[in-house]
């Protein structure tokens, strides 16, 4: 079962890492994920794509999420971050057709400097939970 934390409690518990944009595309795995989530493709049945495909925007989404997002620590110890962007930042494609506008970012594997990556999601699929440390409402 996942553990959910607000940003401040994630800081207190030591889950918040600092990121350098230079290291977010340092591996083949990360470059493949970047390409997947910045260019619409029919190679994937379901694919979320950022509107701005630049490396600068991609890095800023990860940094913004890490500076203020809610944290999920799943049952395998993987750390993920959810951040509501407040505007449309991407789209979801299903079988090559536009399905949903996306206005939030999910950063996955945030504690792994070689696999951390991000993709846009729709806030309509998110729900409200409560921080397991302080009880503050958070998006998950």
Image (cartoon, helix red, strand yellow):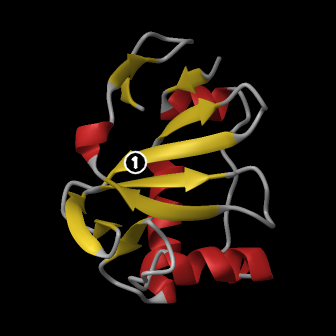
16 or 32: nearer the viewer: 32
Question: Residue 31 sits in which quadrant?
Answer: bottom right
The N terminus is located in which quarter? Answer: top right
Q: Nearer the viewer, residue 117 or 44?
A: 44
Across and down, in percent, residue 21 comes to: 62, 77
Residue 6 position in % (x across, y down): 48, 28
Q: Is residue 119 left or right of residue 16?
A: left
Residue 15 at x, y percent in the picture: 70, 38
Residue at the bottom extreme of this rendering: 54
| Residue 137 visible in this rendered orientation of the protein | no
| Residue 128, placed above or below residue 45 | above
Q: Residues within 10 Å of mark 1 (few under 14, many from 20)?
A: many
Q: Nearer the viewer, residue 44 or 75?
A: 44
Q: Nearer the viewer, residue 96 or 116?
A: 96
Please name the residue shown 73% across and 25% down the image. Answer: 75
Total marks shown come to 1
Viewport quadrant of the C terminus: top left
Q: Is residue 115 above or below residue 126?
A: below
Residue shown at 48% from the left, 76% from the top? 58
Instruction: Label 1, secondary structure: give it.
Output: strand
Q: Residue at x 61, y 64 (%)?
A: 117
Vertical order, 53 against 16 (above or below): below
Side (left or right) of 19 relative to 47: right
Kindly identify which residue carries mark 1: 83
Residue 121 seen in the figure: yes
The residue positioned 66% from the left and 80% from the top of the image is 32
Q: Is residue 125 left or right of residue 16?
A: left
């Amino acid at each position: 079962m996942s553990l959910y934390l607000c940003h401040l409690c994630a800081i207190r518990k030591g889950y918040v890492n600092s990121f350098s944009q230079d290291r977010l595309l340092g591996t083949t795995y990360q470059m493949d994920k970047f390409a997947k989530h910045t260019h619409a493709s029919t190679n994937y049945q379901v694919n979320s794509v950022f509107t701005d495909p630049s490396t600068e925007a991609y890095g800023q989404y990860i940094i913004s999420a890490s500076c203020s997002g809610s944290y999920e620590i799943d049952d395998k110890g993987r750390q993920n971050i959810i951040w509501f962007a407040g505007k449309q930042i991407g789209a979801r494609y299903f079988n090559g057709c536009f399905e949903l506008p996306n206005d939030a970012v999910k950063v996955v594997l945030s504690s792994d400097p070689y696999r951390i990556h991000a993709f846009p999601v729709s806030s309509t699929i998110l729900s409200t939970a409560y921080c397991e440390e302080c009880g503050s409402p958070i998006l998950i």
